[in-house]
Image (cartoon, grey):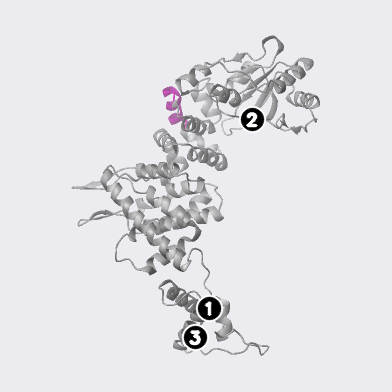
Amino acid sequence: MKHPQLPDLFLFRTIAEAAQELGYPAFVIGGYVRDLALERPSKDVDVVCVGDGITLAQAVGRKLPNRPRVTVFKNFGTAMLPTPEIVLEFVGARKESYRAESRKPEVQAGTLEEDLARRDFTINALGLSLNADDFGTLVDRYNGIQDLQDKIIRTPLDPDITFSDDPLRMMRAVRFATQLNFDIDPDTFDAIGRNKERIKIVSQERITDELNKIIMAPKPSYGFKLLFASGLLQLIFPKMAALYGVERRGQHAHKDNFYHTLQVLDNVVAAGADLWLRWAAILHDIAKPPTKRFDPKVGWTFHGHEDKGARWVPGIFADLKLPLGEEMRMVQKLVKLHLRPIALVKETVTGSAVRRLLFEAGDDIDRLMTLCRADITSKDHQRVARYLRNFERVEEKLKEVEEKDHLRNFKPVITGEVIMQTFGLSPSKAVGELKDAVLEAILDGQVRNEFAEAYALLLELGRRKGLEPKSTDAAGAPAVPLP
């Protein structure tokens, strides 16, 4: 491990000069120092001084070119100063005490040692001096550099106290281990298990923020395995924990849907998935436990798990305080459709089945195919290769139909308004039935999605229902232009 060398010397020497004039010993503390040692880029710098952090920030701002604006957060005793290269946050050294029912500490001014001791992990309790007599010297009271070298997540103090005081640190331990591919120190990990129930005092928003960071790691399955082994997952996401386990009857056994889901998640990550496609991977089989049935002839089945899972998605997103708009609807769509593409492998599949999938998936068809490819998990490599070859055939079918019919997110030319104007109807069941019938005919390839053809079919369907077209509207003009 290289000894960290301090970059941005002009900026840090400016801070050092201001701190010396105020008589405030000052240090860069935390994640910036950790990332510097790991040779990772970092844009956020925490400056801790033994004194008033807001006063130091304002003094630094006056010394910098263009006098950047200092934003003060008086309630927290902090100040933020943005520069073109990095964002600086200033705070006075502090010590904390906690009440059992809250993770919000009572804060008092403290020494550098007390400030380092309150940090969550040794790798975040590193500092660099900004003082004239030892400028750039590493401060490492808890062997954080050694833990970086050994790839270990460990608390500076007793982990039971650390996690009981602020239970979110348990999620952060898993998050850092996942992001950095580190191990959690055995004593620290055992303390997570002992204190897991304390997670209940943490807001769902903070838990989900850490969960999303785990999901966005290069290999999120590692984080979920840690969450499950510690018992945290059973508390923060019980539906996912319920996927764990294999049930056997005679020669019949199903795959462990928990580990299968994690493999699918890692697979979509390898394919470059964003956060929401990763959530679709997590939730694609989420309803398998309640739909599991045993059939003596075929073994274990999970019929309808895709539909039930899709119905669950809004509730899961609401419980986890995830957004309930476009992102949720996309995940819900992928969960519902994730079994559909593989059914198109058969040579006997009609064009209408392909059209329906394109229509229902819309612009998310590529995401759906990525999820479906990721869903092919087996220790039998030949079987995986065979399934992937089949998927290539499916993709060719989709491409052919899309180029011919342009069904991705297409809008049917016959709308409810057209139907109501044509037959002089008010909103009703009959309008919906006619609209659906025309749509089905387009998807079945009976008519093209062009007004003349589709309108002629509408008139015929209306006649079968005893409906006659109204040639004029209330003003005497044609209600709908006839083809």
Is residue 479 on the magenta stretch? no
Distance (Cα) linking label 1 and label 2:
58 Å
- Across and down, in percent, residue 465 comes to 46, 87
Residue at image coords 27%, 48%:
383
Q: Name the residue under label 3.
A: 459
Q: Residue at image x 34%, y 68%? A: 350
Q: Is residue 422 above or below residue 440?
A: below
Q: Which comes before the other along the chain, label 1 or label 3?
A: 1
Query: Where residue 137 appears, x then y in whole percent?
Result: 62, 13
Q: In which quarter of the image is residue 358?
A: bottom left
CB atoms of marks 2 and 3 within 8 Å: no
Mark 1–mark 3 Cα distance, whole angstroms, equals: 12 Å
Which numbered circle lies on residue 451? 1
Q: What element carries label 3?
A: helix
Residue 186: % across, % down: 41, 23
Is residue 456 toward the left or the right of residue 93 in the image?
A: left
Q: How crowded is mark 1: few (under 14 residues within 10 Å), some or many (20 or more)?
A: some
Dot 2 corresponds to which residue? 44
Report the amino acid beneath label 3: Leu
Horizontal side of 193 relative to 21 (left or right) equals: left
Q: Is residue 192 in the magenta section?
A: yes
Q: Residue furthest left?
A: 250
First of labels 2, 3 by sequence position: 2
Query: What residue type is disc 1 on?
Result: Phe
Q: Is residue 64 above or below residue 267?
A: above
Instruction: Mark 3: give few (<14), some (14-19) or many (20+) Cα within 10 Å.
Output: some
Between discs 1 and 2, the one toward the N terminus:
2
